[in-house]
Amino acid sequence: MLLFAAALYPEAAPLIDFLHLKKDPAFRAFDLFTSADAALIITGCGPANAAAGTACLLTARPPKSSDSFVNFGICGCCSRDTAIGTPYLACRITDAGDGRTYYPDLLYASPFAEAGITSFSKPVSNPAALPRLPESSAPDPGQPIAPSGRKQWAYGTLPYGTLPYGNLLFDMEAAACYQSARHFLMQHQMIFCKVVSDYGTSGRPAPGAVADLLKEPAASLTAWLSGLPAPDLSPDPFTESDHEAIRTASERLKLSEAMHAQLIRLMTYASLTGHSPAKLLAFFAAPEFTCTSKKEGKRYLEQLKYRLSGQADL
Amino acid sequence: MNSLNTVCPARQTFNPPFSRIYAEREALAHPRAAQVLSAFPASRVIVIDHYKDVFNRTHQSFYLQKQSQALILAVKKGTLIYPGAPFCQDFGNSHFYYTSSVMNCIYDCEYCYLQGMYPSGNLVLFLNLEDIFGEVRALLARHPVYLCVSYDTDLLALEGITGLVRDWIAFAGEHPDLTLEIRTKSAAFSRIADLAPLQNVILAWTLSPEAAARHEHRVPSPALRLQSALHALRAGWPVRLCFDPLLLLPDARNLYRTFIEEVFRTLPGDQILDIGIGPFRISTEYLKRIRRSRPACAILSYPFEVTDGSASYDRTAMHALMDEVCSLIAKYVNPDKIYRYEEDN
Ligand code: SF4
């Protein structure tokens, strides 16, 4: 499942279009657009709306370990060397409110450039006046350090110390979306894709222009996301008949909760070492099998453990 | 046996290892930073205030991060040298310490305790080795020191990037009262083959039979490790062999028997400094975390016995395997040189 948060409808429009999302009329607090394998929420502008909208989306659609969350939209840029319409993935997100910086994982290879972004609670009209980081004793990261002479910095060609909060980009939502989403997702599941729409001085583009500007980046983004792996980090080691056999054995052996957990552990090991839990436990499902007490059940469990831990042939 | 690889995407999907380098501002000022960064001209450097801002984040997938490991350059503060941990063997040394100038490892062994110990699969490299040297000097002023410098990582495997092993060896050359153990699963002896051997620097290879090595991802094969150990031995270095952790795999006795015969067909047993043998053991807390991170790993889902916060194989079965391994090795190596880790150590 892909889960998107966008501040305004024009930012969401290309995604709604590409992914064939339909508005969910039953959803009240925010506008929610969904399909079988995607959901998009329009949060409204600013950090409070972004955090509330993100939390609302991720509560309504509780994410699995194979899902991704994407905050998509426009941003300002501190450098006129960067073309309007350039999409970035955020590798560094600073909340201008408290100066905290967050680092979403960027594990998967992507077609996008990466940059840092600072989130403000108000629109930025004069980036030149934004606070810079205090000078440090560190070498100016804008200078090449590698003998190859290549600049290695994540912030384009601008020296780190000259960028507000050390970040090239600015917006109003990324930090709030991150702070909200991290309660629901793992670091690598959060993606912040921002497209440069202005340099902070010329005002934001009109809604129609935003949708046009985002069309191409949205196409690249959806293409990239559709090819992303969805690793299932909590795979079920059991088949339906294994589950059934475990339930039956647990009942018939009169296992306590702790003993039931032990049985699950044993059967997980069995399954991962190529044995069939359903077959191993078939004995306990037979009509002629009887077990009269928890104590007797425990003995059967011990026997199973003995066999499975390599001390007896299976 | 299965592993999480069955549910994990192919390696090409990931950004290459160390394509992201997070660097503390203070670390960037360290002379070693330029040397390390020069090994990665195409990597992005992301400036951070403190390594914990990245390393200690909540909700990280250790396992997935290992597929696209980031490098974190930092300056270590606070305690730099630690007394030897109870889970580790001291090989009869009384002033036993360890230090970690690197946190985490480039290899990915399914049973590795680091997965339970660290919140992140990324690799932290502390650049201020000179501060660690300072602390070792202070200890040496009081008594001889036996120091393991490759715990919580594999330092020799990283030598091409860090050069730390060379620096440690040079330091040990100036301090005869210091004995270093550099433990590795690498085949990277060639990185230091030009150095003159020192009798107070022990190069220790962890060896595993092929069936166990299948659970050690990205680690050089047992045959390559043996060749590397052989070169070190021939060059005159004290070489230790570690059969640790022993894994109770199906048909374990035969696996280890065949493997030990192979080891001593390659290495002259009488020239080995000593041998360490230890069963797989892990703190239950770590095991719980690792099982969450690698839920489909067969080795870790074994029904271990739990005693005093430590999980290990069934005592009787493991003792039998340890006895067997010890007596097999004793055919080639003086039994006085065989150190066996016992649970009640
Ligand atoms: S080589 Fe050692 S430190 Fe590295 S992953 Fe394997 S067990 Fe862990």
Image (cartoon, rainbow, N blue to C red):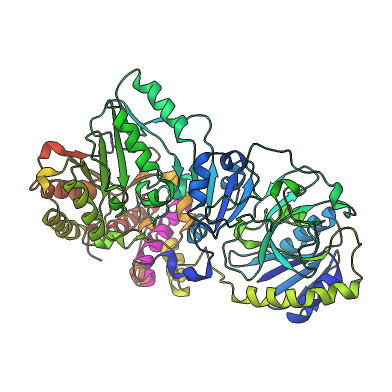
Q: Could you say where residue B344 lies in the image, as x and y percent from the top left?
A: 28, 34
Q: Residue at 34% x, 22% y: name it.
A: B140
Q: Main secondary structure of the magenta part?
A: helix
* Location of residue B85 (image quadrant): top left
* Marker count (numbered): 0
Left or right: residue A179 versus residue A187 is: right
Q: Could you say where residue A178 lies in the image, as x and y percent from the top left?
A: 71, 55
Span of residues in magenta: A253-278
Residue B236: tell me if it is visible. yes
* Nearer to us in this view, A171 or A196: A196
Membership of A257 in magenta stretch: yes
Question: Vertically, is A66 above or below B66?
Answer: below
Most distant residue in the top direction: B142
Left or right: residue A161 versus residue A188 is: right
Q: Residue at 31% x, 53% y: name it.
A: B188
Q: Residue at 44% x, 39% y: name it.
A: B101
* Nearer to us in this view, A154 or B98: A154
Q: Could you say where residue A185 lies in the image, as x and y percent from the top left?
A: 64, 58
Residue A37: tell me if it is visible. no
Membership of A12 in magenta stretch: no
Assign the C terminus of chain A to one quadrant of the image. bottom left
Question: Vertically, is A70 above or below A37?
Answer: above
Assign the N terminus of chain A to one quadrant of the image. bottom right
Q: Could you say where residue B333 lies in the image, as x and y percent from the top left?
A: 11, 44
